[in-house]
Amino acid sequence: MRIAVIDGQGGGIGKHITEKLRRELPEDVEILALGTNALATSVMLKAGANEGASGENAIVWNMPRVDLVVGPLGILVPNSMLGEVTPRMAEAVASCAAPKILLPLIRGQIELVGYRGEPLPHLVNELVNRVKELFFPGFTAESG
């Protein structure tokens, strides 16, 4: 299985997701760090991603080549992350056939009604638990 973790700006959200996925999923799961910029990619690689690439073309090219996409909701919104998510990136992610498990984090003029303001670590735990539930039922870090 190949999981794309997409993040931008400083890569902090992607870092937390990557670390938790690496700790809790089987060792043979490939984590691909896709940053909207080189700093975000570098941070996710240091957190345990197998490979990484940066920028619009890297994200667009890799979307048909992954089995799952994870990251903040902003990766679906053109011009989010202070303009780092290009319309082409957002379209590639939204059009990707792979399932997407996203954190309800977005800044700017979009409001998510019904969203409860949980701290980032709690949201990352929920994301990783959902990945395990959907793709690795019965797997625990201790059993792998």
Image: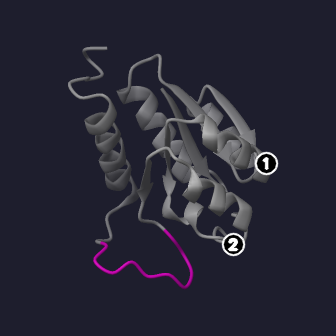
**Residue 51 % position (x, y):** 66, 28
> Would you call the spot at circle 1 few (<14 residues within 10 Å), some (14-19), or many (20 or more)?
few
The amino acid type, in three-letter code, at marker 1 is Asn
Structural distance between the alpha carbons of marks 2 and 1 = 16 Å
Q: Residue at x 73, y 38 (%)?
A: 53
- Amino acid type shown at disc 2: Asn
Q: For residue 114, which quarter of the picture?
A: bottom left
Q: Secondary structure at mark 2?
A: loop
In this view of the protein, which residue sits in the foreground, 36 or 134? 134
Q: Is residue 55 visible?
A: yes
Q: Say which of 14 and 86 sits in front.
A: 86
Find residue 62 and report its horizontal and vertical position in percent: 67, 40
Decide: is 35 above or below 141. Answer: below
Q: Which mark is residue 79?
A: 2
Magenta stretch: dominant SS? Answer: loop
Location of the C terminus by quadrant is top left
Query: Which image quadrant is residue 131 in?
Result: top left
Nearer-N-terminus badge (2/1): 1
Q: Is 114 in the magenta? A: yes
Q: Which mark is residue 75?
A: none
Q: Identify the residue at image location x=56%, y=50%.
A: 96
Q: Residue at x 31, y 73 (%)?
A: 115
Residue 17 relative to residue 79: left or right: left
Residue at 50 percent of width and 35 percent of height: 67
Is residue 124 found left or right of 64 in the rendered image?
left
Left or right side of 96 for 78 = right
Magenta region, residue range: 106-115
Front residue of this view, candidates 117 and 99: 99
Q: On the image, numbered disc 1 is attached to which residue?
A: 57
Asked if one can make out residue 86 in the rendered structure from this viewpoint, the answer is no
